[in-house]
Amino acid sequence: MKKSKYVKIFIREAEEHLEALRKGFLALEKEGVSDDQLNELLRSAHTLKGSANMVDLVELAGVAHRMEDLLKDLQNGEQELSSDLIDVLLVATDAIEALMAQAQSSGGISVNVDTVVKALETGTISEEQVDAGIVPDYSGAERRTSIRASVERLDQLVNRMGEILLSQKAMEARQQQMTDLLQQMDNSVGQLQVADDDHSLRALRSNLVNLINDFERDRLQLGYQAEDVYQRTMELRLLPLATATDDFERSLRNLARTLKKEVNFIVQGQDVELDRNMLDAIKPILLHVLNNAIDHGIEDPDTRVRLGKPKAGQITLQAQYEGSFIQVTVRDDGQGLDPAKIRSTAVKRGVLDAEAAAAMSDEAVIYLVFEPGFSTREFITDVSGRGVGLDVVKSNLDQVKGNLSLHSKIGVGTELVLRLPLSMAIFTGLMVECNGETYIFPQHYVAEVLRVSPRDILEEMGREVVRLRDTSIPLNSLSQFLEQEQTAQITRRLTVLVLSFREQTMGLLVDRTVGLQEIVVKDLGCQLKSLEFFSGSTILGDGTPALIVSVADMFAASHGRQALQLRQSYEKEQNKAKRGRVLVVDDSLTTRTMEKNILETNDYEVVVAVSGFDALDKLNAGRFDLMVSDVEMPGMDGFELTKKVRQREDTRDLPVIIVSSLSSDEHRRQGMAAGAQAYIVKGNFQQGVLLDTVETLIS
């Protein structure tokens, strides 16, 4: 009988028992011998032994058999529980895992089974034997190609899929009905050419309207069902945090023993669920943080006792939901971070100059530990001092659109708080517009949206800021980051996003906000992967593509950027407004442009019109201090325009200057009769004359 097809079934079963064994062994070391716990461990070892024999995995069955014997000795009191004994049992689980991988790959993985069996028989194993490679350094992470889903969830999904198929059939029927109605309408139109009777056409139209309403109802129903199926499918990807943290127990125990430290690792919120991809992405982040806490944070037992602390340090990993996010807190009761030492190291390693380091607060200084290559260790070990520090945490966190905050107190301990979206595939985004394009900001980075007046922009220490609840927030512009022209009207109220990132804030000027939308993340593709300030893309509801902004990149690039000079631009516009607002009316592009440039150069605000009718529209839309008009224009000449200006209540007193090539006295008299205050001939045109006249009439 071919047993290879049963190996895969055995592997799935064995993975569960292997996980239970590892967790149980670590629990024995922490909590001591328990009959109930030992019975569970014996049951797992016994099942592994029997199932392995059934599929002819003799070596694996042998290891499980010896493990079972050792557990029975422990249960009968013939073997004493110790950390060395737990080492033996854990090495045996590694051997079983490697033998499982060997069975899957049909060889290629070598395991020193005899040495493992001997260690189980004697209850001891030497460090030299472990270092000699009894079990290969095999990571089973790649084995998790499937996830376990509850029958209830699968039943719900199957039922929803059935409803969607029914809706699809209904929509197909509606489509056929509309096709038939269209054919009937074509036939009716042909008949109407012969008979002047539209009764049949009206009836046909009524039927078509009813059908369209039915089709819309079916479409909405299908949309609801598709959304529900999508959400339930996403739930199938969810895994509890324990899937990752269970593996940490073993590695943290080994590290603590290597460093001659004692550590109690406590996990709270193991049932919190995350998307599988998110879990895989944050697992190395958490492990790095935890390793760092043991190596840098927790003191050795003698030091802790001398300081009045418990001999064993405590590291707590706590997870909890926060709306559509998950907050993971890693807390230790170690020595804490020393801002003075970090500040000194930063200067020594060239991360900051002495003046900048001295100006930073202690709260800001501790974040320097996330800078690339930063380490306070002078001595290089396998764990520390290699320049691969917490910057790995920061870069990996940026990839999953997460945020962090760090708090520490010397002698008390350190707390690192990670805030993560539940899924890397979907999140809520704020849509904004800038220069006619739509961009997406992950909502959890947007603290507030402000509407500010240009006069609210202040200058502090050479940078532009806005004040929010007694706090100065540095101001930047999305168009400046993207190296685009600033299009926001400086004379109007401005839209500013208040972005929050690692306890830093930044104001970002955009043209306007559009609203919130659930965003399905798409990769940028190989052509756009190097695009700065963007982390992905999406398709909006109307089919338009949009880029997802990388807030982390913007904060990294915000330091030392050139000021926007929004305040100066506003003051310049205000000065123009104070001098006067002038309407220039001329059908000649050359004349219009020349007069506009002359006036704007001298700080007048200028609006142009290309005809008399256009000028009246401009006068209806806004207030002006003076009008400069040509005479010869199509449709309405300057004399007629001036008369209409004098007839209007709101412009009766508006000064008018006529600038025309008509130079006769008769034309001058016509201008004065129409109501103009000045008449300038183009042939004798001088810039100074126009400016002097404008200034005289406005003042």
Image (tube, rainbow, N blue to C red):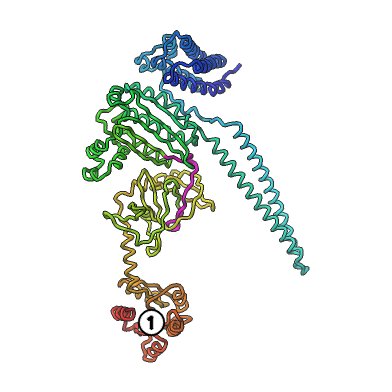
Left or right of 479: which side holds 385?
Answer: left
Residue drawn at 55 percent across, 14 percent down: 50
Disc 1 crowd, CA 10 A, few/some/many (<14, 14-19, 20+)? many
Looking at the rendering, in which quadrant would you find the C terminus? bottom left
Quadrant (top left/top right/bottom left/bottom right) for the N terminus: top right
In this view, which residue lies farthest toward the front? Answer: 308
Which residue is disc 1 drawn over? 656
Asked whether residue 24 is drawn in magenta, I would say no
Confirm whether residue 215 shows in the render. yes
Q: 634 and 691: which one is in front?
A: 691
- Position of residue 528 measured from the top left corner of the image (x, y, whole percent): 42, 46
Magenta stretch prevailing secondary structure = strand
Name the residue rendered at 66%, 49% in the picture: 218
Amino acid carrying mark 1 in the image: Val
* Snapshot quadrant of residue 579: bottom left
> x%, y% of residue 343?
25, 39
Q: Give the range drawn in magenta.
A: 419-438
Number of callouts:
1
Q: In which quarter of the image is residue 465?
A: bottom left
Helix, strand or loop at mark 1: strand
Residue 278 position (above or below residue 74): below
**Residue 424 inside the magenta-drawn segment:** yes
- Above or below residue 656? Residue 347 is above
**Which residue in the rendered view is the most extreme toward the top?**
78
List x then y, in percent, for residue 656: 38, 82
219 shown above or below 565:
above
